[in-house]
Image (tube, grey):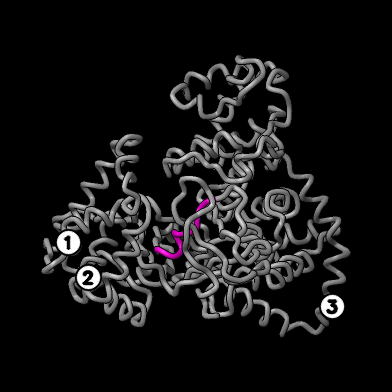
Amino acid sequence: MGTNEGVEVKKSLIPGAGNGLFARKAFSPGDVVASVDRPLVAELEVEHMLDTCAWCFQRGATDPTERKVAASMGLPHGFTEVKACTGCQRVAYCSRPCQSKAWKREHKYECKAIGKKEEPDLPPGVRGAIKILGRLKADSKSEMVHVRNIQSIWPVGDPNGLNHIAAHDKKKFDDFQILGEAAWIYSGKPSIEGLDLHAISRGLLPNIMSNSYALSSQLDGINLGIGFDPLICSANHSCDPNAALVFNQPQHEIRALRAIKQGEEVFLKYVETTTPYNIRQAQMKEEYLFNCRCARCSSSTRLEGDQFLGRPEDLASEYCQLADKLASKHESKLSVFVESGGDVVAQRRVAALQAEAYAVLDDEQATVDGIKEAIRMCIGSKMWRWTRQPVPRLCRRLFTMYLGYGYVYQAFRLGMKLHFEILPALYPQEFYLDRLTNAWDVSTVINVLCGHGQEEVFNELARGGLEPRVMYFEFLFYVHDHAPRMFGPNTPFWKVIDNTYKQIIGGMGIPVAKIKEKTKALRPSMESLARSVNETNL
């Protein structure tokens, strides 16, 4: 079978879900279920239009401090250079090949439209629609196939889809209409005999924006833009997905997370599935306008991650006082965080703490101290395990900020806790994307600890029985052993991993098996270090 001959699109088994993606053959964990060389729509967010390649999505850090830190860790955004298109000066490319590919496929249709200096930067959905309209005008026969595929998806593909959006979120509906109109106008109000491009433009935007997904690099985790492809977007959501979407800049792959039987529906996740049930449902309703009715959500059994560690009625007095203050701050959204059952006042207090923690997580301007305080609040209240959201995501956010500021030792300790204690409890697959990226980041941090300027920390760890060079190999082996089940041989992430592995191992005079014996012997000490990280010493 060809790459995508192993799947087909047909009626979903989930009531009201429309079509779904189904396996035409069996897949094992790590298998490529489907792939596209580049999604039909791949657009950068406005803030990344001039620091990220518009074709391959490789980012070059522009902040001098971030660039220096990234370069010291061997990360690509510390070295990548992008140059703006000389025509529009609105998008940039990292190389002539990328610029050439982009021009031939799509940029020639938008360059003039987005290049007017007096006009603001257009949002990604509009730019994507402009390119589709341009390709359609240039080759209506072949491009109309893509347009029909887009139009077949919800909401435009459902007779009641747009009415559903209008009834549940009038602002979103109006925005879709305005943006669709803008795409047609900025495209020069194109026309083709026999086709209503005005109507097509107004139909493209709702489908692109309702089904788009975030595009981010595995190497730095920054949200770069949005993607949309009819095949990829045929896969429905499940809070217990059997597959994962991997962005390989610019290739996309759907990889099996567990065994998928022939005839089984392929599910991805649209939101973070480790989020507690009621918050997860609220996110789905707000972002995708439906209540999730997957097997996990339909079950009466609630998993550990859906439950608090302690009873809300047992919340300590100091946290009761804090919660009472926070309740008024988050009054408008408090209902989202209230659990059903139990004492109403107690549930409201814990909901206020939860609302505050998520508010910090969602705050792009949150500081290191602000995130640490949110983690301390959750753990200190004795209502949260380290593995209950949003604590894991707050930890990962804090880890990323430590890296950005060059706080290497702090990042090392928190990364160890994520690797050994938090992420395995959330994601059982060792090749799960979040576990791989965290392990790679930790290996990079330890490598820095082994370098110049870190002698004091290096020696302190070594005296405590934690030899940094051995720890480095623990994480290098982990990533190199498990990454092939999530990343192909020609993907940017795997190339960085494999090149590093070959370079390091090639310079060693010790057999790999001998080094692995040392890492295995050191593992209990590393696990002990991970457990020692708590809310007071973050």
Query: Would residue 301 be found to the left or right of residue 69 on screen?
Result: right
Q: Amino acid at mark 1?
A: Leu
Choose top left, top right, bottom left or bottom right for residue 73: bottom right
Mark 1 nearby-residue class (10 Å; few <14, some 14–19, many ≥20): some
Q: Height in image: 409 above or below 36?
A: above
Q: Which mark is residue 288?
A: none
Judge whether residue 39 is colored magenta. Answer: no
Q: Which residues are magenta?
A: 230-237
| Residue position marked by numbered label 1 in the rendering | 197
| Residue position marked by numbered label 2 in the rendering | 136
- Residue 453 seen in render: no
Which residue shows up at 62% across the image and 50% down it?
240
Which residue shows up at 80% across the image and 56% down it?
526
Q: Which mark is residue 513?
A: 3
Which residue shows up at 23% across the image and 67% down it?
89
Among the two numbered marks 1 and 3 on one chain, the one whose residue lies closer to the N terminus: 1
Q: Nearer the viewer, residue 504 or 10?
A: 10
Among the two numbered marks 1 and 2 on one chain, the one whose residue lies closer to the N terminus: 2
Secondary element under disc 2, as helix, strand or loop, is helix
x and y, in percent, of residue 30 in the image? 65, 68
Distance from disc 1 to disc 3, alpha carbons, whole Å, reads 63 Å
Q: Quadrant of the N terminus?
A: bottom right
